[in-house]
Image (tube, grey):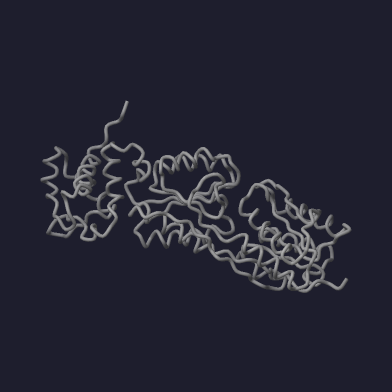
Amino acid sequence: MTQEAPLYRKIISFFLKEIAEVRLRAGDRLPTELEIAEQFGVSRITVIRAMRELEHQKLLYRVKGKGTFVREDLDSRNDASVRHEAMAESGSEPYDRESFGRSSIPLISVIMSDSEHSGQEILLGIEHAARKHGYYVSFHNAMLDPRLERSLLEKLAQDARGIIVYPCAGLNNIDVFSGMTIRRFPYVVIDHPLEGIEAPLFSPDNERGSYEMTRHLIRLGHERIAFIAPGLYLHPSLRQRYKGYCRALIEAGIPVRPEWIESEDWHPDVTPGDLQRETAALLKRWLDGSFRPTALLAGNDILAIHLIKSAQLAGIVVPEELSVAGFDNLAMTEYLEVPLTTVSQPFYEMGKYAADSLIRFIRDGAPIEGKLLETGLVIRASTSVPPER
């Protein structure tokens, strides 16, 4: 049984249709609140609620003592969004209500897979872009749990007008994402592409960043460079970093050795103590082997930090005896005992571009084009020339 729409939404639907079909034009004055109340047989409070919603959608504006008017700049906008909202409110286009969300305020939602290290900068970029457009942001953390991510996606697709998601790795929720694509619900992804789905992606150039860092190590004189990344075969972004590492070695005429590539699928809930023990065991295996690497390239800064600590505990001096490089340029890495050489990611810009593009699509119907953002080398004290053989 279909639930009847609230009275205030009937008023919204009526005026959206009037605007979409150009019976109300930019600058036109609407009837008074009392006239609208009499027309629809509702209270003045109901009319006020409907008018406020249309103001939030930037379709109307009020002038004290003069009345309510259609926005003067409405003609300069792509009216596709107005038409979509009108069709959704009238029920003649069933998917578009979900596509533009049910929230009575202009709201986009953000789902991070884990916000501990980089989420603040990403969210800051999103919030600044949203504020510029008059939108609000709700923030949610999936905690690297695909089940929680699924629950958040299903709920927020009903409440928000669009979603920015930093996906958990894997194909666990591919049905949810593909369903959102089919329904044309506005969403974009950051950093991790959705394999098999052409969703707009805003990501650093992971391959280029790893390629440039590996070239830096080669220029220093390193030929025995090991690569470590947890979940290498699960995370698309880490596979891109691995690809850049391989490309730089091959271009330099250095064969890629399987014993120098490590991809431990550590559980997301691994404790710092457990991670320290794992990296210590890994480092011991490498350094006790017949092909001892002189440099380590970690898939992220956290791993690099643990590798440096494991080396120091084993009596290995960084960088004189072993160079270590990371990827992310987290704020802490500048202030370590051995400041970390790493690849900087444009976290703020990634969030800003994602939010700006998503909101322009929701508001104006502007096509969303993903963006590959430049990374940069940050050379610090954890890398140097290799030790003499």
Quarter location, residue 46: top left
Where does the image place residue 39, in percent across and percent down from the top left?
A: 12, 40
Give above or below for 80 relative to 123.
above
As drawn, the residue found furthest toward the top would be 1
Where does the image place residue 1, in percent across and percent down from the top left?
A: 32, 25
Q: Quadrant of the C terminus?
A: bottom right
Residue 285 shown left or right of residue 229 in the figure: right
Quarter location, residue 205: bottom right
Where does the image place residue 150, in percent across and percent down from the top left?
A: 52, 40
Give above or below for 278 relative to 184.
below
Q: How many marks?
A: 0
Quarter location, residue 102: top left
Where does the image place residue 10, in percent across and percent down from the top left?
A: 22, 39
**Foreground pick, 55 / 252:** 252
Q: Is residue 136 visible?
A: no
**Foreground pick, 153 / 219:** 219
Residue sitting at x 26%, y 44%:
86
**Foreground pick, 231 / 369:** 369
Residue sitting at x 43%, y 43%:
156
Residue 365 shown left or right of residue 218 in the figure: left
Q: Is residue 316 visible?
A: yes
